Image: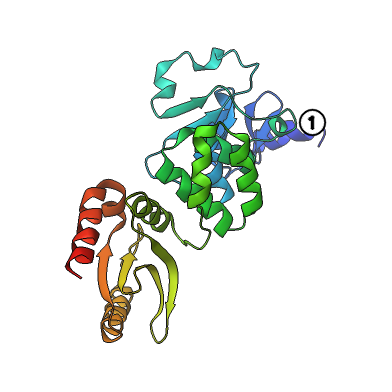
Amino acid sequence: MTAAQIERAVASGDLWRVVRGWYAEPGTDPELIRAMRLGGRLGCVSALRLHGAWTPPDAGMHLAMPTSASGRRLRDSRELVDVTVHWRSKVGQQEWRAGVSSVPNALAHAVECQPPHLAVAVLDSAVRRRLVSRSVVLALLRSLPARHRPIAEFLDGRCEEGIESITRYRLATAGIQAEPQVVVDGVGRIDLLIDGWLAIELDGREHHAQELAFSRDRRRDALLAQHGFSLLHFSYSHVLYDWPLVQASIESVLQRR
């Protein structure tokens, strides 16, 4: 577009002026625009959200800054209430010409930024959703400081949702091995299976919003019982905000058996 065409598009509302030299179409993610106006780019879990990975709740905005950034746009603390700034960004010059960190760089941010159980969930989802290959993730972990490398042994792209990865990881660190996405004849897939008999079903953020979904899952529960499985259900909020309840419940059932 010529300069005159750009100005006409801005005047008509077909383009929004973001910062010098950058324009956005209506409907562009508002966090991406906000990040650029703060002098950075979306990074870490904020970038991964745009790329389509599972991301933790309540994460706020994660801002990747270039090594040359002075931070002059970040002096107003009111702008930073929900912002995590990654000053030592892995964003390269080529990527800096885009509005958001690439998947590998954003994953590197996330591993260094998030606690291990959330980092594993983010990495699992990136592999599961084919945003990146397992080999790329393993190479990325090898490039990071040694304290992050043990995460590699917990990766499993079979988990369909973040809360499945979180549950599997936290059980593994407690000495309990859970197999994800096990197929049971006549029932279908179950989220996690422990010792071949204890099924763990995990409900997502918007699960059971409809009566039909609730009825279908109760039927699955009955079929699992017919096959000799014991079953525990946990919600999204249980896994994220009340983990001691989840772990204690699973351990109690295992001990009774």
Front residue of 149/103: it is 149
Q: In terms of secondary structure, where does tag 1 sit?
A: helix
Q: Position of residue 46 (x, y in %)?
A: 51, 39
Q: Position of residue 115 (x, y in %)?
A: 41, 38
Rendered image coloring scheme: rainbow
Which residue is located at x 23 percent, y 65 percent?
254
**Residue 132 seen anywhere in this rendered image of the structure:** no
Q: How many marks?
A: 1
Relative height, residue 123 to residue 217 (above, below): above
Relative height, residue 74 to residue 182 (above, below): above
Q: Quadrant of the N terminus?
A: top right
Front residue of 93/135: it is 135
Which residue is located at x 38 percent, y 82 percent?
187
Relative height, residue 172 to residue 89 (above, below): below
Q: Quadrant of residue 167?
A: bottom left
Mark 1 Cα shell of 10 Å, populated few (<14), some (14-19), many (≥20) = few
Q: Is residue 228 left or right of residue 15?
A: left
* Residue annotated with mark 1: 4
Front residue of 207/44: it is 44
Q: Position of residue 202 (x, y in %)?
A: 33, 63
Q: Quadrant of the C terminus?
A: bottom left
**Residue 171 seen anywhere in this rendered image of the structure:** yes
Q: Position of residue 10 (x, y in %)?
A: 67, 34
Q: Residue furthest right?
A: 2
Relative height, residue 82 to residue 142 (above, below): above
Which residue is located at x 78 percent, y 35 percent?
5
